Image: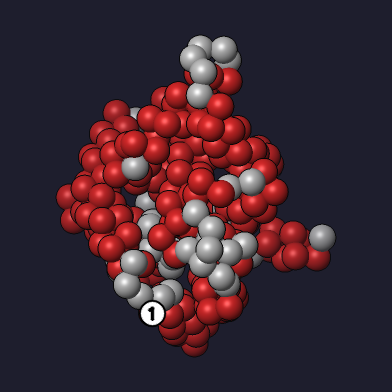
Amino acid sequence: MRFGLFLCRLPALPSYGTNTTMTLFQQLLIAIVQGITEFLPISSSGHLILIPHLTDLPDQGPLIDVAVHIGSLLAIIIYFRKDVMGLARGGFATIGLGDDPVQRKMFLFVLAGTIPAVVLGLFVKLNGYLDDFRTTDLVAINLIIYGLLLGAADYWGKQHKSYEDLTLRDAVLVGIAQAMALIPGTSRSGATMTAARALGYSRVESARFSFLLAIPAVAGAGLLAALDLADASAQMQMDAVITGAFTFVAALVTMVFLMNFLRKASMLVFVVYRVALGCALLAIF
């Protein structure tokens, strides 16, 4: 409760105006930052919040943040298209269209893992806490804390489970970790990979489940953003679409790199980066 009251007292950044035109440079910068940091376990939302602090650009606001997450979502769907098709078959089987018990089970597990983020996301959205979370102190603290947790889970976690070994318990636990990533600086991919590694999933399989679990959560956030986007100016709508498209390209390239990287190396480089950046932010701001 005290933590919640503390958040409410934190100063929020000025939001990007709905009638302000974004420059091509700002669109490309946001897209590249989002595309790279969304899949690396270093917090995309935290880095997006840092852009106005480190440049003369205005804060792009949560609407653009969600638009770039949609671009990342499309990259996930393209890269994991076989898994996505399998989940789709499982979804149809769940409502009696087709018979695929294995994919039906995986679909239900992914759905169960999405529930914590949906519940917490609606609570945050409806109570207007999004702007309260957009502070450098909170980003810095979460970068450090969750970075250390990622390092511990990756060092001591076993690597004997794959995505196909997923259980309902594991899906819910990783889903709870995903819900915590609504607070900037945590990193959705970082939190979910940390939980999966702690549960014994390999690095590649942790990333695989993390990205598949993102699909319904990010899609749900996109639907909520669509309501806000409908009330935005035509220029703001165009800015969101263009920035999201740039993000898709950057995200797809980053995902290919990350999946290849995790087959050969540990998470140590991401842990060091998170802790170093978090300490630097606390010292600077």
Q: Within 10 angstroms of label 1, few (less than 14), some, or many (20 or more) residues? A: few
Q: Name the residue at 38% across, 79% down.
A: 269
Q: Position of residue 13 (x, y in %)?
A: 49, 59
The one nearer the camera, 282 or 17, is 282
Please give left or right for residue 148 compared with residue 252 in the image. Answer: right
Residue 14: tell me if it is visible. no
Please give left or right for residue 61 compared with residue 19 in the image. Answer: right
Q: Residue furthest left?
A: 24
Tell me the residue that label 1 is attached to. Answer: 269
Residue 151: tell me if it is visible. yes
Q: Position of residue 283 (x, y in %)?
A: 49, 87
Please give left or right for residue 127 compared with residue 27 in the image. Answer: right
Q: Name the residue at 67% across, 43% down.
A: 168
In terms of secondary structure, where does tag 1 sit? helix
Work out which quarter of the rendered image holds the N terminus and state it: bottom right
Q: Position of residue 162 (x, y in %)?
A: 49, 54
Q: Quadrant of residue 241?
A: top left
Amino acid type at circle 1 is Val
Q: Name the residue at 39% across, 38% down.
A: 83
What scheme was used to colour the molecule? secondary structure
Q: Quadrant of residue 113?
A: top right
Q: Quadrant of residue 20?
A: top left
The one nearer the camera, 12 or 43, is 43
Q: Residue furthest right?
A: 1
The one nearer the camera, 195 or 136, is 195
Task: Tell how many labels.
Answer: 1
Q: Position of residue 265 (x, y in %)?
A: 35, 75
Q: Residue furthest bottom?
A: 283
Please give left or right for residue 15 compared with residue 11 in the image. Answer: left
Q: Name the residue at 57% across, 72% down.
A: 157
